[in-house]
Image (cartoon, rainbow, N blue to C red):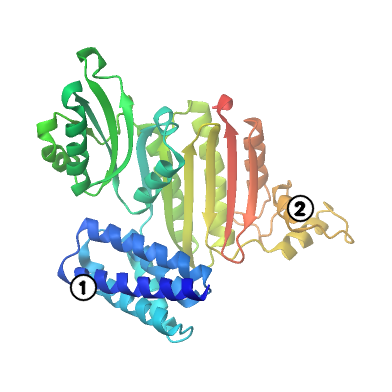
Amino acid sequence: MTDFRQNFLAESINNLTILQKELTLDFTDNLRRDIFRTIHTIKGGAQTLGLQNAAEIAEELENILSNSTKSADKNLLVEGMEVLTNSLRQNDTDSHTDFIKKLQNANQKTAKSSILLAKIPSEVFKKFSEQERKATISALREGKNIYCAEVGFEVSTFADRYRNLRKILGEKSEIIASLPSEKHKSAGKIGFRIFLASREPAENLQKSVKEFDAEISSHACAENDSKDLYEMLSQIAAHGEDIAENIGKEINLTILSNDIRLSAGRTKAFFDILIHLVRNAVDHAIERSGAIEIRFFEEDEGLYLSVADDGKGIDLQKVRARAVEKNLISDDHFPNEQETLELIFAPELSTAESVSEISGRGVGLDAVKTAVEKMDGKISVRNRNAKGAIFEIFVPVEKL
């Protein structure tokens, strides 16, 4: 472990030093990606080795990189990387608290509620590997657009031209996945759909590959657009922001989704579920300011939905006390953590101190569970060690 620790520290410090020098010269999209990956790796290693201060600095630097889209934060990143380097050298757990707060304040100022929708049809997304799905989500979190390049190659020149096209695309974008396409089969060509993540406009990518006769679409080869889904998620985001503003809180609400096709009835059901969960997070979990992240993805077996917050978490003692008041459990019964968490879905149970326009009537989470079960789905909740809570819902594919 000693050798591993020394190698990790030496390699991390060396990589940060190189990236700092590059950052003082320019701040390109490729460099941003390199810095993000390096810092993400350092965060994981620091957590493993118990270097908590370095891990916290790395996490806040990740947030800066994810939230910012221009080079305005370059000076802060240079300073942050220097602080991270010193932390790795000295393993100092106290002296960088002020800088962590500085990064957190910067993140709160730059963060904006956003809907990061990958317009990838669900039947296509199902064909992505787990690594490709993670790459898509990571790209969305970094604020990149998702594109699809539809292209056909002559059999005789396929290998060279396909390799050259990927090389050119890689200069201005990140290649997430490649799938075969039937579009050019009638012409005797080998067809491919290449999925890309980039901050570049689609027209810029189109110009760079004009010699290949590739068609680059921001709809990621979808046969229909995502208007209904996007409108629903936009309403959820706006509603969450309005609630927070009305009760004097600030939220950073992010929604990550692929292009899910739902019937009108299912869209309404999920809209109601999300409204309840977002209201619950804003009112109960977030204290003064915080983040809420919604993930809404269709997978092989069905649809996965989660709502996570970074608030104070669920007060298990308060939940138990209210359950006793409502005669849901006896005064001498002490359920375990998971059993206590399940109680929050009971009818008429609320931990709110008083009834308000937002909460206190004990119908929100009960209604959510009922709606999920009507679709033969399952819902669960997890406390995240005083770092908030996450509600997870799964609905099987035959019910969509």
For the view shown, which residue lies furthest in the top direction? Answer: 186
**Quadrant of the image containing the C terminus:** top right
Check whether the beta carbons of the residues at disc 1 and disc 2 lie within 8 A of each other.
no
Identity of the residue drawn at 56% across and 41% down: 273
Q: Nearer the viewer, residue 48 or 136?
A: 48
In the depicted structure, whether residue 273 falls above or below residue 80: above
Q: Nearer the viewer, residue 28 or 141?
A: 28
Q: Nearer the viewer, residue 286 or 102?
A: 102
198 vs 177, left or right, is left
User: Mark 1 and mark 2: span between their CA atoms?
Assistant: 53 Å
Q: Does residue 248 appear in the picture of this structure?
A: no
Numbered disc in front, either 1 or 2: 1
- Disc 1 marks which amino acid? Lys
Question: Dot 1 surroundings within 10 Å: few (below 14), some, or many (20 or more)?
Answer: few
- Disc 2 marks which amino acid? Glu
For the view shown, which residue lies furthest in the front direction? Answer: 3
Identity of the residue drawn at 46% across and 67% down: 45
242 vs 150, left or right, is right
In the depicted structure, whether residue 365 falls above or below residue 318: above
Q: Nearer the viewer, residue 148 or 91?
A: 91
Identity of the residue drawn at 31% across and 52% down: 143
Residue 229, horizontal then vertical, whole percent: 41, 35
Residue 388, horizontal then vertical, whole percent: 57, 61
Query: In the rendering, which numbered label is found on residue 266?
Result: none
221 vs 306, left or right, is left
Question: Dot 2 surroundings within 10 Å: few (below 14), some, or many (20 or more)?
Answer: few
- Element assignment for label 1: helix
- Residue on which disc 2 sits: 339
Residue 359, horizontal then vertical, whole percent: 61, 54
- Element assignment for label 2: helix
Query: In the rendering, which numbered label is found on residue 21?
Result: 1
